[in-house]
């Protein structure tokens, strides 16, 4: 029988998988990939961060390998996006940003809460949340031969870390798992979109 915290982690993980798979599929189509390429990019975007997190916290084999629902959901989402590409293209303006923010929020919360379930200390758990949120996108961008978004986007990994921190902190203060997840996910989502809309950036070093 799963605990409430485990149910929240599973739900956020699967929801994030679907959202990031769709975002990855749109990115793949924008780069002119064929059906197989789109499905591969969808899969990597959706499960990459979770695999990295699971390996780091000792949850082996990772869920994406042990549980068939993760790869199946990611690849089916990618295939569906490819088939209905005209619909996705109609919303391609703001849709990828919204999906990315939603996936980032879901994975940041799921990553942090799963790390806590495995006995990881709170601060490290927040870092695991950030890793879960950005890991798949980093691998995706490397495959597409572009600089990873996390290295230059306006408040990206920072938003994931904030969401994970809020989720872990509110849970420690006694909030139920669902409420803590909503608080953390909401904080990440709002900060990420505000950063995009207002062109917020972290300070950068001058070019040498």
Image (cartoon, rainbow, N blue to C red):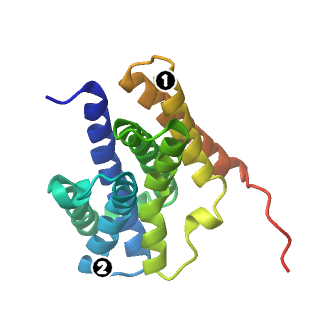
Residue 153 located left or right of residue 28: right
Residue 118 % position (x, y): 34, 41
What separation in Å lies between label 1 and label 2 (alpha carbons)? 42 Å
Residue at which label 2 appears: 37
Residue 142 % position (x, y): 48, 77
Determine the residue positioned at 46% across, 16% down: 174
Residue 78 located left or right of residue 20: left
Question: What numbered label is drawn on residue 98?
Answer: none
Residue 112 % position (x, y): 44, 41
Residue at which label 1 appears: 172
Mark 1, secondary structure of its residue:
helix
Residue 39 located left or right of residue 31: left
User: Between 200 and 110, which is closer to the camera in this rendering?
Assistant: 110
- Can residue 30 be seen in this snapshot? yes
Q: Residues within 10 Å of mark 1 (few under 14, many from 20)?
A: few
User: Between 33 and 65, which is closer to the camera in this rendering?
Assistant: 65
Determine the residue positioned at 24% across, 54% down: 63
Instruction: Tell me which corner region of the image, top left, top right, bottom left or bottom right, holds residue 43.
Output: bottom left
């Amino acid at each position: 029988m799963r605990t409430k915290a485990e149910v929240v982690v599973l739900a956020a993980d699967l929801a994030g998988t679907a959202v990031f798979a769709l975002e990855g599929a749109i990115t793949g189509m924008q780069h002119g990939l064929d059906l197989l390429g789109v499905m591969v990019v969808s899969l990597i975007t959706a499960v990459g961060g979770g695999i990295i997190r699971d390996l780091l916290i000792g949850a082996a084999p990772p869920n994406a390998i042990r549980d068939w629902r993760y790869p199946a959901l990611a690849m089916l989402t990618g295939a569906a996006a490819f088939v209905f590409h005209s619909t996705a293209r109609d919303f391609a303006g703001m849709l990828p940003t919204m999906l990315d923010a939603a996936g980032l929020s879901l994975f940041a919360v799921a990553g942090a809460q799963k790390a806590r379930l495995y006995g990881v200390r709170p601060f490290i758990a927040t870092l695991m949340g950030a890793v879960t949120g950005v890991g798949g996108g980093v691998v995706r961008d490397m495959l597409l031969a572009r600089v990873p978004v996390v290295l230059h986007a306006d408040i990206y990994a920072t938003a994931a870390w904030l969401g994970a921190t809020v989720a872990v902190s509110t849970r420690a203060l006694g909030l139920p798992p669902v409420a803590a997840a909503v608080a953390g996910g909401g904080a990440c989502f709002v900060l990420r979109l505000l950063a995009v809309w207002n062109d917020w950036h972290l300070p950068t070093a001058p070019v040498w």
